[in-house]
Image: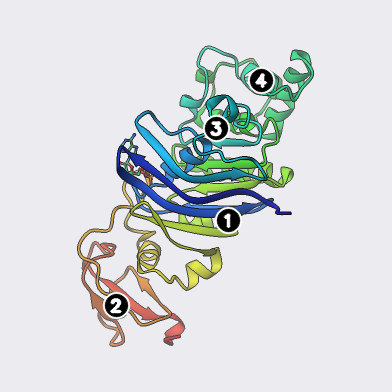
């Protein structure tokens, strides 16, 4: 008997014969919150879409995905997958407008999600539940908001509606793909909070894709690090963030506050990667070059984090090499 909500084994995504994601193996248990981080293009979104059975035309998945004790989902027919989506597993995307129907009142869209999966007996009950859900996700005047069309709401309010839809049928698994990246910075924390509270209230499993390592540290129990289409490191957040085992993770951590583009995305690490042996065990990368520190080794600009000197530095944690 397993309490794992999601189990993926050797999940890969191919464009023709070219692998874009390779051999992703992960499990997420009930109530567990797992972060998925990595630079732009490392394969995070394709992993999420493959888990949902929503890969775009031209791509296909290999390996295995199971939800609880379900049958194999990779390669399953759409008629088998469709009833699972929105009921057992849901997804919140970055851009709420693409997930909403612009011609339908948002209350009806939330109610529709419940009617589709028959989790409410009739339209009247579904509409009442929709208003309650909109209230739960913090929309002011929820009854009035339910009668609005998406364009009448702010970006943050639309993402609340999308979250309400995703949670409407109490899914066992919620996958979030950068749900707050497109939002004004002042509402990001609010939306993040309502997502995590919604997940916790249902004891659901969550896979949270983000470029924001601070969010992972706040929200997640475990973290998976993707690089070049593969998971290169996985473990409890504290462990991975304090003692990264993979040099890419260490670089990601060092670069996290500086090497970002205007959208807050981590940039691809440029330049050559030095040998792992060049870094003393237990050290963290610092993005500031402390040339004055005699214990500081300067390295090629593979982290690319320091705009002033173009070097990354290695410092022993707490002054000691562990
Ligand atoms: N439909 C597609 N056809 C071919 N290649 C694709 C397709 N979609 C994505 N890719 C490629 O697959 C790789 C992984 O893309 P993916 O969108 O999963 O990255 P990501 O880590 O989510 O990036 P970001 O953080 O920018 O969203 C990238 O090299 C991307 O160019």
The one of 319 and 111 positioned closer to us in this rendering: 111
What whole-number distance in Å separates the C-alpha atoms at marks 1 and 3? 20 Å
The mark lying in front, picked from 2 and 4, is 4
| Quadrant in the rendering for residue 304 | bottom left
Is the C-beta separation of discs 4 and 1 under 8 Å? Answer: no
The mark that comes first in sequence, 2 or 4, is 4
The mark lying in front, picked from 4 and 1, is 4
Secondary structure under badge 4?
A: helix
What whole-number distance in Å separates the C-alpha atoms at marks 2 and 1? 32 Å
The one of 191 and 252 positioned closer to us in this rendering: 252
- Residue 46 drawn at (x, y percent): 42, 41
Say which quadrant the N terminus sits in: bottom right
Q: Name the residue under label 2.
A: 290
What residue occupies the far top of the structure in this picture? 103
Q: Is residue 74 left or right of residue 18?
A: right
Secondary structure under badge 3?
A: helix
The mark lying in front, picked from 2 and 1, is 1
What whole-number distance in Å separates the C-alpha atoms at marks 4 and 1? 31 Å
What whole-number distance in Å separates the C-alpha atoms at marks 2 and 3? 42 Å
The mark lying in front, picked from 4 and 3, is 4
The mark lying in front, picked from 1 and 3, is 1
Q: Name the residue under label 3.
A: 159
Q: Mark 1 points at which residue?
A: 220
Q: Mark 4 points at which residue?
A: 116
Q: In this view, does 284 lie to the left or right of 123?
A: left
For the residue carrying disc 2, how many other residues have a C-alpha within 10 Å: few (<14), some (14-19), or many (20+)?
Answer: some
The mark that comes first in sequence, 4 or 3, is 4
Assess mark 1: CB under 8 A from ligand 1? no
- Residue 180 drawn at (x, y percent): 49, 41
What whole-number distance in Å separates the C-alpha atoms at marks 2 and 4? 59 Å
Assess mark 2: CB under 8 A from ligand 1? no
């Amino acid at each position: 008997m397993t309490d794992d909500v999601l189990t993926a084994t050797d999940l890969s995504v191919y464009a023709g014969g070219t692998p874009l994601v390779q051999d992703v193996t992960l499990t997420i248990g009930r109530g567990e919150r797992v972060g998925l981080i990595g630079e732009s293009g490392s394969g995070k979104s394709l992993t999420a879409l493959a888990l949902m059975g929503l890969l775009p035309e031209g791509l296909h998945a290999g390996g295995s995905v199971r939800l609880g004790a379900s049958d194999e989902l990779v390669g399953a027919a759409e008629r088998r997958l469709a009833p699972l989506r929105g009921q057992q597993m849901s997804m919140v995307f970055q851009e709420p407008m693409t997930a909403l129907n612009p011609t339908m009142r948002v209350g009806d869209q939330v109610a529709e999600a419940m009617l589709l999966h028959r989790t409410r007996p009739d339209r009247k009950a579904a509409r009442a539940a929709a208003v309650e859900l909109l209230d739960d996700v913090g929309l002011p005047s929820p009854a009035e908001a339910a009668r609005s069309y998406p364009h009448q709401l702010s970006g943050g309010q639309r993402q609340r509606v999308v979250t309400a839809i995703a949670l409407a049928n109490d899914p066992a698994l919620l996958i979030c793909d950068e749900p707050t990246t497109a939002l004004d910075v002042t509402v990001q924390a609010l939306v993040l909070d309502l997502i995590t509270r919604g997940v916790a209230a249902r004891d659901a499993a969550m896979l949270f894709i983000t470029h924001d390592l601070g969010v992972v540290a706040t929200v997640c129990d475990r973290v998976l690090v993707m690089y070049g289409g593969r998971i290169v490191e996985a473990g409890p957040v504290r462990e991975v963030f304090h003692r990264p085992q993979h040099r890419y993770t260490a670089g990601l951590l060092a670069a996290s506050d500086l090497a970002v583009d205007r959208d807050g995305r981590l940039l691809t690490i440029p330049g050559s990667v030095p040998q792992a042996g060049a870094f003393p065990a237990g050290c963290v990368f610092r993005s500031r070059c402390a040339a004055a520190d005699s214990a500081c080794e300067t390295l090629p600009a593979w982290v690319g984090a320091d705009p002033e000197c173009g070097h990354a530095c290695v410092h022993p944690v707490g002054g000691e090499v562990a």
